[in-house]
Image: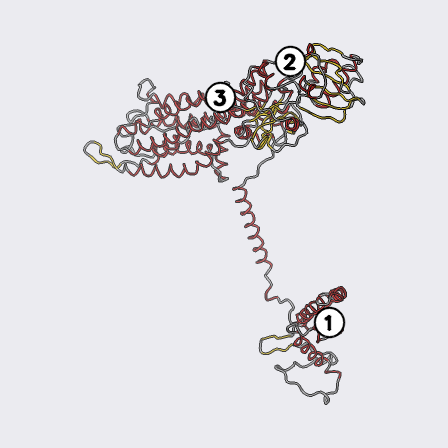
Amino acid sequence: MPDEELERILSSVPPLSDTTDLPGWEDILSEYHQSSSSDAKPTQPAEAEPPKQKKHPEPPKPLEKPEREEPRSVFTGEELEFEDLEKRTKQMRDYAQKVQSLRPENAAATSVSVAEPELKEFSLGPEFGEHFSPSNEFQMPDEAEHVFEESSQKKEVIKSFLRRLKQPEETPAPPLPQAFAQAQRYAVNLRLRAFLALIPLLPLIIISCCQTWGFLPGFLTYSAEGQPYVTLFFMVLLQFAVMICGIDILGRGISDLIHLRPGAETLVVLSCFASLMQVGSIVLRTEAEGLLHNTAGFLPYCAVSAASVFFALWGASHRQSAYARTYKLASSLGEECDCVVSEERIWSGHPGFSRHNAKLEGFVAQTEMPDVASRVMRFLTPLMIVAFVVLGLLSASNHSSVVVGEDSVQRQQYFFYTFAALCCAGVPMTTFGAFSYVFSRIAARLSHMGASVTGWSGAVEMSRGGHLVLSDGDLFPPGTLALNGLKILGDHSFETIISLSASLLYASGSGLFNALASIVKNQEGYLRPATGLEAFEGGISGIVGGERVMIGTLNFMHSMGIQVPAELSAKSAVFTSVNHDLAGVLAVSYTPASQVKGALLLLEQQNMTNILALRDINVTPTLLRDKFGINPDLPEFPVVEERISLSDPERPFHGKVSAALGRDGLCPFAESVIGGQRLHKFTIMNLCIHLISLVLGVFLVFYFASQTQPVAAATISPANLLIYMMIWWVVQWLVSSFSHRY
């Protein structure tokens, strides 16, 4: 580094007397002066400079450059030592900056002076670079470098492949119209293939169940005296026909296994594979060891495996039909529509549901989220596969040999036989119907009511709340309110009273405006802007056209000091005052809708709490009791401020869209909430039935397969296993049949 740079840095440093408290400062300055004096040596005569003792001899100077001094570095053997000027300069700059920080008046100037030198300005000379020039000794050959790059690329490919196995790329959900078309087309395809799979399944069941009845043809009789290999050939052929019909189910099971996420479809694949393995073990069995005395016990489980494929197709068709009904209604509503939103704290810290105008973003993805049965089976499948192998080995260990007559014959291991039976019992007929059967029925009912639930996700959200926010339009939709008469008091005309009353009711959002809507619908200029709105218990107030207008019940008028004649008092009468003078009396009739009455009674039966967020000054729990016959003590009737806040259409909500509504009124609102709750309830019931049949079936198969008595094999024959699984499926089907009856 040039000496001018060091001098410029040191010029900003205070005198040494001011820096004595900094450790190491004197050593650095003395070292710097010594190096400066030694650097200045070539410019002085040789006799004037005393010789200095050095640790190492200095190398000779190059002949071609006598005026330039060699860098301060020498070679001693193979060790290179040199003075790090750059490090020294950095230390001096740091100390100078610390000293300047002690003087606030010089802080700015010091920071500027210290920051000026940059590392890129330092130059140690061309000779310094010669000692550190790159050497070819450490360079990798081109071929080795190419091999190294190829191995790195292979490692990255393997890592990305493993990453895709654990987390496969999910395709984005299609829009609602496209999702509806795909679900409808897939549902029809599944029903057709299920019907085609039933054609080979029925004769396969007959062959498996009717061996002991004696009416089967001779070539289909499974016995040592007959032609057992022909029977096995037909059974395998029929099983393959059923598997081809359910090729997508089997493909999904294999794909889930490859992606390390085995589920119920993987168990179906394992069941079919185990049955074929059992057939292979029978074919490879020698004639002496062959079909022993109890041939029914060794009959392959091809019929049970094929039945699992058929019921997987049947359950998937119900699921896709439910998707099609759900997407059909949602796709006809547009981007924004009335939705049921579940909120954790809707009122007084209670979870509940409200009606909002929201977008159906993510509706398809939310509807197709895995249900609880799929998640449980995805968790249990790896454990079940390991358990089947272990239990098969344990049961086979009890059957090392068997005595036939007087000779002891070594019997083939029962592993394939027990393993196939366990795999078939692990996929009962109830596997794919726990959610799909209930969802299909609930979706069919809701589609007729003008609502659609977002699958299992919506069912979970609706099972958490028990409060519904009801507005004026839910209880008395348009058409249920009518104006029976109008009495004018004072000097105001009929048109003026109607205009003032309708303008104030419209601005306040009250449902009473529906009673006057038919009058002001085709009349221009009836509705005027209203300002200064105020809400009270039983009335509203505001300024319309420069007039102070108040509308309310009889009690409200009395509380405002407005006298009302006794002959004008009525239960459903609404009074209008202008500038604190009674100006008119509106007689309003409320006609309860039968659907609303049924929905209120349904909510009451399901122990749901209604929060009456009403702006209609006439509607109270007492009026609801008179009109709908419900218990007035059950609904919650908040204060007027909370009612206005809850019924505000612009109120921000924090929750998920659980259902889409295609009609007005309380009926679709209540139906969607109750339907979602029943979907959750009956799915849990079906899941319990499925788990009981699965665990009990596996236990019974293992118990009888472990017995050494000859009758044990006949106990878990394919016919008995099919009957056992069919009984549980009937129970599940009956439970699902009551899910939509409420």
At 70% from the left and 71% from the top, the residue drawn is 124
Which of discs 3 and 1 lies nearer the camera? The answer is 1
Residue hosting label 1: 13
| Residue 695, position as x, y percentages in the image | 38, 31
Q: Which of 27 and 513 is in front in this view?
A: 513
Badge 1 crowding class, 10 Å Cα cut-off, few under 14, some 14 to 19, many 20 or more, is: some
Tell me the distance, in whole angstroms, between the alpha carbons under discs 3 and 1.
89 Å
Tell me the distance, in whole angstroms, between the alpha carbons under discs 2 and 1.
96 Å
Which of discs 2 and 1 lies nearer the camera? The answer is 2
Q: Nearer the viewer, residue 86 or 59?
A: 86
Q: Mark 3 or mark 2: name the one nearer the start of the chain.
A: 2
Where disc 3 sits, the SS reads loop
Vertical order, 22 against 623 (above or below): below
At 30% from the left and 21% from the top, the residue drawn is 212
Give the residue type that dot 3 points to: Ser
Q: Mark 3 or mark 1: name the one nearer the start of the chain.
A: 1
Badge 3 crowding class, 10 Å Cα cut-off, few under 14, some 14 to 19, many 20 or more, is: many
Instruction: Write down the quadrant of residue 52 in the picture.
Output: bottom right
Residue hosting label 3: 739
Would residue 66 be seen by someone viewing this image from the given angle?
A: yes
Instruction: Write down the quadrant of residue 473 in the picture.
Output: top right
Q: Residue furthest bottom?
A: 47
The image's mark for residue 571 is 2
Image mark count: 3
Which of discs 3 and 2 lies nearer the camera? The answer is 2
Badge 2 crowding class, 10 Å Cα cut-off, few under 14, some 14 to 19, many 20 or more, is: few
Q: In which quarter of the image is the N terminus?
A: bottom right
Q: Mark 2 or mark 1: name the one nearer the start of the chain.
A: 1
Give the residue type that dot 1 points to: Val
Where disc 2 sits, the SS reads loop
Give the residue type that dot 2 points to: Lys
Q: Give yes or no for contact between labels 3 and 2 (Cβ–Cβ under 8 Å).
A: no
